[in-house]
Image (cartoon, rainbow, N blue to C red):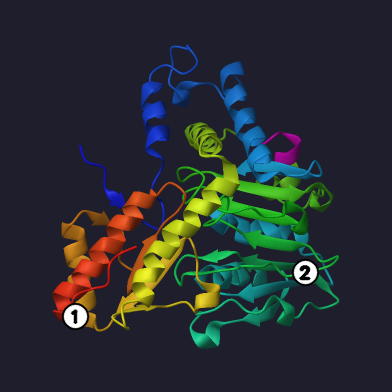
Amino acid sequence: MKRALNFNAGPAALPEQVLLKAQNEWLNIQNSGMSVMELSHRSAEYDQIHNKAIDSLKELLDIPENYEVLLLQGGASLQFSMIPMNLLKPGKKAEYVLTGSWSEKALKEAKKVGETFVAASSKEKKYTFIPNAKEIQIQDDAAYLHITSNNTIYGTQWKEFPETGEVPLIADMSSDILSKKIDISKFGLIYAGAQKNLGPSGITVVIIRKDLISSDDKLPSMLNYATHAKSNSLYNTPPTLAIYLLSLVLDWAKEQGGIDKIAEINEEKALTIYDVIDQSGGFYKGHAEPGSRSYMNVTFNLQDEAAEKQFLQEAKEAGFVGLGGHRSIGGCRASIYNAVPLSHCRELAGFMKKFQASYTGKPAAAVK
């Protein structure tokens, strides 16, 4: 069987080594005679898997001791509601920087809980850039400032994070967590759906500063961070299979050399494709401004709609999967998360060059 050239935006590619490891242990995990899906979440065998995943996250991301790591369900979409429910107190405003569809959705949910304020936005320019961190307006009554660190639909990414002083900085890092080194201490809370860089869909990682966790009896138990912090994310039955696979992905990340090495490879992967776009003479047109380009999602259009349609058809026939842009904006998108090999990015770059030459009848520049 030939593995697909998978550029899906999420659920996304998983490391082949992880899938083979899971396959090998599918019927018998830790000599238990059971699949991980059959283990009791209160068993010693599962407890080891669960805690290993948390410890590996702490190690790889260099998470300080004053932070809690929670393994939750509901995806980033549930966090859109949980964050204001837990952190937006009366008399305060939740501030949001709008950089794409996901930040808009986060703001929409916060408005249902309390007062909000748009601290900065690039919407008027079709989300082609990340606002300058120094231009963000943080009000005196801000409960927190929320950003989306990487925008999968528009292909933009924060290169430096805003300084917020005493106001907690909150980031949706669903699509670029574990892809580069970050200073966790700059954030009050980070959350991420796993299905891009961390593992399969069904598990959400929340990293929250402990002083932001408060026991509010008025909140539903399942929507209260304190509930999950007190129970080590075992208040109810967790998604055991997803957490097991998360643990295997984190093992794989260590084997690659950790975040520094992964970041180095991610940059090379992205530049391999962006170089083709930049050298195409306008045949390929990147959506994001160069200073805001994402290293996780390369978004682009072709010179006309007919070329775009033919490009996607021929790419599919050549074995490339997931290159169509998001349904809301169309175009093309190559999602190149951690598990997408550099070789696949080079194959895509080569295909893009060949397609341009074939479509225009002009020789394309050599692919780096």
Q: Is residue 219 above or below residue 284?
A: above
Q: Is residue 247 above or below residue 354?
A: above
Which stretch appears magenta? Answer: 228-233
Quadrant in the rendering for residue 314: bottom left
Image x and y of residue 49, in percent = 57, 26
Q: Which residue is mark 2?
A: 163
Image x and y of residue 74, in percent = 54, 50
Q: Is 184 in the magenta? A: no
The disc, 2 or 1, on the residue closer to the chain's N-terminal end is 2
Q: Give amino acid for label 2.
A: Glu
Q: Secondary structure at mark 2?
A: loop
The quarter in which the N terminus is drawn is top left
Residue at 53% across, 88% down: 124
Viewer-side residue, 298 vs 76: 298
For marks 2 and 1, give the CA distance: 45 Å
Q: Give amino acid for label 1.
A: Ala
- Left or right: 50 with respect to 64? left
Q: Which residue is mark 1?
A: 306
